[in-house]
Amino acid sequence: MRRDDFLHTDDAFFQQVARRCPVGYLSLITADGYPRSIALNFAAKDQAVYFHGALAGEKFDLLSSGVPVGFTMARELSYIPSNWTGPEYACPATQLFKSVEIKGRCAVVSDLSEKALGLQVLMEKYQPEGSFRPIKADEKMYLKALQQTGVFRVDVESWAGKSRLFQDKPETFLEKVISKLEERGLPVDLETVVEMRRIPAGGNSE
């Protein structure tokens, strides 16, 4: 990464982005040599990334061979209009975000207990209120679904996190933007303010 001040390598950053990011993008090379990016719901258990899909089709065929893959998760925060920091000049417009880029390999999960784990962490992420019976391999009501549903695991070989929260800007600039975000008051703006206020003086946020 070109900017070390935007780089994150701590596990807490990985887990936060994985937890708060609703969609991830699996990247692979198809049999005809073209890249393909697939948008997926996903969940992380430690630093293994799980998603589900069909047990047939191009994606399944490619992943069955253990090909190297990329996986990107990006948590969008506030869009900052250009006129907040530069009247008439368009170039200051920017998008704040947190992201993780992964390099690894993807495996088709065959063990029913691990399939149950993968589906369980997906449910916990997207339905945190619960209201469902935990998914277990020995739970009779889930046996057919576990047998018929494809579960996939991305094993992370390396990853890099990145954030754009104006951590390279002086405190006076940060306070000006925070004031504008609070004035606009969208839910994502208030979330962005929390993230920006975590930035220590002269350093990256956690």
Image: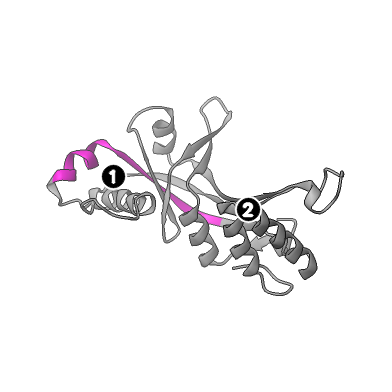
Specify whether 10 is left or right of 143.
right
| Vertical placement of residue 41 versus 1, above or below | above
Residue in the picture at 73% in, 48% down? 94
| Vertical placement of residue 80 versus 63, above or below | below
Q: Residue 15: within the magenta?
A: no
Residue 100 appears anywhere in the view = no
| Vertical placement of residue 18 versus 65, above or below | below
The colour style of the image is one colour
The quarter of the image holding the C terminus is: bottom right
- Which of the two residues, 197 or 114, is positioned nearer the viewer here? 197
Write down the residue under mark 2: 97
* Badge 1 element: loop
- The residue at the far left in this view is 140
Tell me where residue 104 appears, x and y as whole percent.
51, 50
Specify the amino acid type for callout 2.
Answer: Phe
Residue in the picture at 51% in, 66% down? 12
| Mark 2 surroundings: few (<14), some (14-19) or many (≥20) residues within 10 A | some
Q: Nearer the viewer, mark 1 or mark 2?
A: 2
Write down the residue under mark 1: 110
Residues marked 1 and 2 touching at CB (< 8 Å): no
- The residue at the far bottom in this view is 201
Range shown magenta: 141-158
Residue in the picture at 70% in, 71% down? 203
Specify whether 105 is left or right of 88.
left
